[in-house]
Image: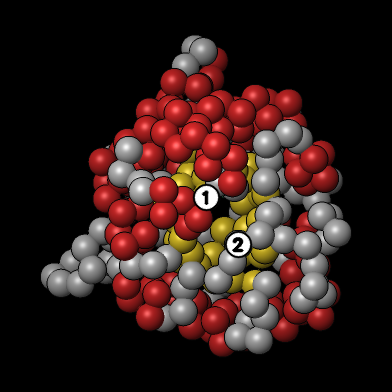
């Protein structure tokens, strides 16, 4: 699997069961030519992963992933899913540390680190989500918070693993709120992320895709995608409807 930028990713959260998933792709596939620029990744609920994998089987430009994993591979962990089982079920990527995991479900930075390790050890790619709250931004702590989310993960990565690591900058105040970071704000934080990564990995950091997420819509997507250091988008609400998502996927071409 090769991931090419720009990466246009859809995080469906708790939306679209297996039947809606099949219907989504039946509508999307004819609208997105297989030779489009970049990679498309969809993160359905894990109950719909098999349906997604089945309908995109002939499309190497479209990948499916899971929204979260537990760090143990298997065992007495009722309700959890693991990276090796997701891999076996056809997932190629996993989101880790999404702000809803951190802020709604109380996931700690230590837990996020263990999840990234589990994802990479299972040969999947990881999209590590980072981002500050509105209080943190207003108090001038945004870059420090993002550094604190990145550093503990970066410290565990080998150079060999970098080709399977992506970062998504998603300011918490922009997720599902209709309030988007300006392209300049996004570029500023993406540059900061790149600098933190460069401290660990030198010039190899320049190849790590950094996506922006938070109230991305068809209207603001072109300017965000054109901003410096923005290598793709992680889209929630606007990824649920096939024709809207297809139009965003068409922007890079
Ligand atoms: P949103 O969600 O696009 O609905 O703001 C983005 C995300 O949570 O990944």
* Image position, residue 234 (x, y; %): 62, 51
What SS does tag 1 mark? Answer: strand
Name above or below for residue 1 compared with residue 130: below
* Image position, residue 212 (x, y; %): 63, 42
In the image shown, does 164 or 201 lie closer to the viewer?
201
Within 10 Å of disc 2 (Cα), the crowding (few <14, some 14-19, many 20+) is some
In the image shown, does 218 or 120 lie closer to the viewer?
120
Q: Residue at x 50, y 22 (%)?
A: 143
* Residue beneath disc 2: 3
For label 1, being within 8 Å of ligand 1 is answered: no
* Residue beneath disc 1: 166
Query: For this view, does 124 lie left or right of residue 195?
Result: left
* Image position, residue 116 (x, y; %): 35, 52
Q: Which residue appears farthest toward the left when viewing the image?
A: 76
Q: Is residue 172 visible?
A: no
Q: Which residue appears farthest toward the top when viewing the image?
A: 139
Name above or below for residue 18 compared with residue 158: below
Q: Residue at x 32, y 38 (%)?
A: 155
């Amino acid at each position: 699997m090769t991931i090419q930028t720009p990466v246009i990713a859809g995080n469906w959260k708790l939306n679209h069961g297996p039947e809606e998933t099949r219907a989504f792709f039946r509508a999307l596939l004819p609208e997105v030519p297989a030779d489009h620029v970049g990679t498309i990744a969809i993160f359905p609920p894990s109950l719909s992963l098999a349906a997604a994998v089945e309908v995109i089987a002939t499309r190497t430009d479209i990948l499916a992933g899971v929204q979260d994993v537990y760090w143990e591979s298997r065992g007495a962990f009722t309700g959890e899913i693991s990276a090796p089982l997701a891999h076996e079920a056809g997932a190629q990527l996993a989101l880790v540390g999404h702000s809803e995991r951190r802020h709604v479900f109380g996931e700690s930075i230590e837990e996020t680190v263990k999840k990234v390790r589990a994802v990479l050890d299972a040969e999947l790619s990881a999209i590590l989500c980072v981002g500050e709250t509105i209080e943190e931004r207003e108090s001038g702590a945004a870059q420090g918070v993002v550094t604190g989310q990145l550093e503990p993960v970066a410290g565990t990565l080998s150079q060999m693993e970098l080709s399977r690591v992506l970062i998504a900058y998603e300011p918490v105040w922009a997720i599902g709120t209709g309030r988007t970071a300006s392209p300049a704000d996004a570029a500023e934080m993406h540059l900061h992320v790149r600098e933190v990564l460069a401290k660990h990995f030198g010039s190899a950091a320049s190849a790590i895709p950094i996506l922006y997420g938070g109230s991305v819509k068809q209207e603001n997507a072109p300017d965000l995608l054109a901003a410096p250091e923005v290598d793709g988008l992680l889209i929630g609400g606007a990824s649920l409807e096939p024709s809207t998502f297809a139009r965003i996927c068409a922007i890079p071409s």
